[in-house]
Image: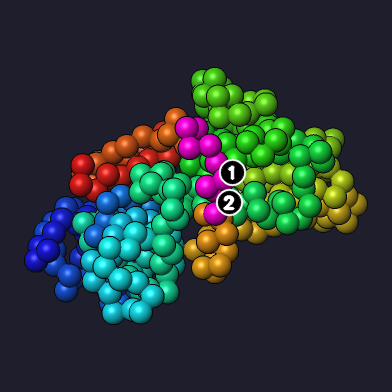
Amino acid sequence: MDQFKALWIDKLADEKPTATFKEISLDDLSEGDVVVKLSHSTVNYKDGLCLAGNPGVLRKTPMVPGIDVIGEVVSSQSPDFKNGDQVIMNGFGVGEVHTGAFAQYARLKSKWLIKRPEGLSAAHAAAIGTAGYTAMLCVMALEDYGITPDKGPIAITGASGGVGSVALSILSKLGYETIAFTGRMQEETFLKQLGASEVRDRASLSEKGRPFAKEQWAGAVDVAGSHTLANLLAATKYGGAVAACGLAQGADLQTTVMPFILRGVALLGVDSVQASLQKRQKAYDRLLTDLDMNRLEALSTTIKLEDVPEYAKAILEGKVRGRLIVDIEG
Ligand code: NDP
């Protein structure tokens, strides 16, 4: 492994960062006690932001982007991992401040790794990736708040995207009635195949609305933020909750306290990046039982490492459907 292929982002002086493929060595990677040979990765919205040079994500250059690592340990100084162990790593600033996944090898801190569960293939782990594992965290947050299927439907925004499509698949398998919001009504059949009870145009949530609206759903998984999140809160039933994880529409949130103080609605923040290993392990165990792997395959597209820049651009334009699997050796 003297030299291997990596997507490399560099920034010269005041210029815009540029991403190019180049041959690098382990010495070019950030410090860590475990080296992983990648079999797969994926492209998330955040990877799109990183390749576009968004300074909130690309926090250090030069950088190997890629926030999800799926592969095999080939060298370890940690007593917790040995050569041949199959591992998963999502987040922890990898691909942002620590060299990441769009390369044949990654050097990582063992405290970030979980062992890939028995029964979960490397390709399925990539299809899940940060987006899918975050979808599971959102569902767990709603469950922890007591939102059971008998309480009423769950609204899901960005339903054709990564977090949304996986959340929809999980919730429908768990027996929830689901309302999928999308800007791509042409995907209605696809979303119904994933289990959507109803598909609605996201435009109905996009504009500034009233602070208090007719009660429509017991819970929601929101990837959009901004007016969408405010409108979701305004139409959440008494005692319901909204799990918020994203900012696809915007990072702002203009709302009032009315849904909170008159309906006891809760806003549940979901973060995947710094979640504890225990929580991650629980999420993956749940994904094994509560995500239909046939549906996961139906919502996934496999691409090659060379295709990453093209798809990173497309994901920011809302043109990627479901999840992407990057076959590193493909
Ligand atoms: P994707 O790009 O795969 O999906 C996002 C979807 O949001 C799009 O496909 C589109 O779906 C919808 N969307 C796009 N623009 C808008 C808009 N203006 N208003 C409403 N909906 C819109 O991204 P991911 O699923 O990977 O990530 C979704 C969000 O969640 C991102 O903001 C990401 O940063 C965040 N995230 C946060 C995590 C955390 O730890 N908190 C972890 C993972 C993701 P459609 O066409 O169906 O409307």
Q: Nearer the viewer, residue 202 or 286?
A: 286
Q: Quadrant of the N terminus?
A: bottom left
Q: Which mark is residue 290?
A: 1
Q: Nearer the viewer, residue 243 or 225?
A: 243
Residue 309 is drawn in which quadrant? top left
Q: Which mark is residue 189?
A: none
Residue 260 in the figure: left or right of residue 273: right
Residue at 77 percent of width and 48 percent of height: 147
State the SS at label 1: helix
267 in magenta: no
Characterize the local packing of mark 2: few (<14), some (14-19) or many (20 or more) Cα atoms within 10 angstroms: some
Residue 123's x, y, as percent? 36, 44
Residue 100's x, y, as percent? 31, 62
Look at the image and give the residue range highlighted in magenta: 285-295
Residue picked out by circle 2: 286
Circles 2 and 1 in contact, beta carbons < 8 Å: yes
- How far is the residue under mark 2 from the one under mark 1? 6 Å
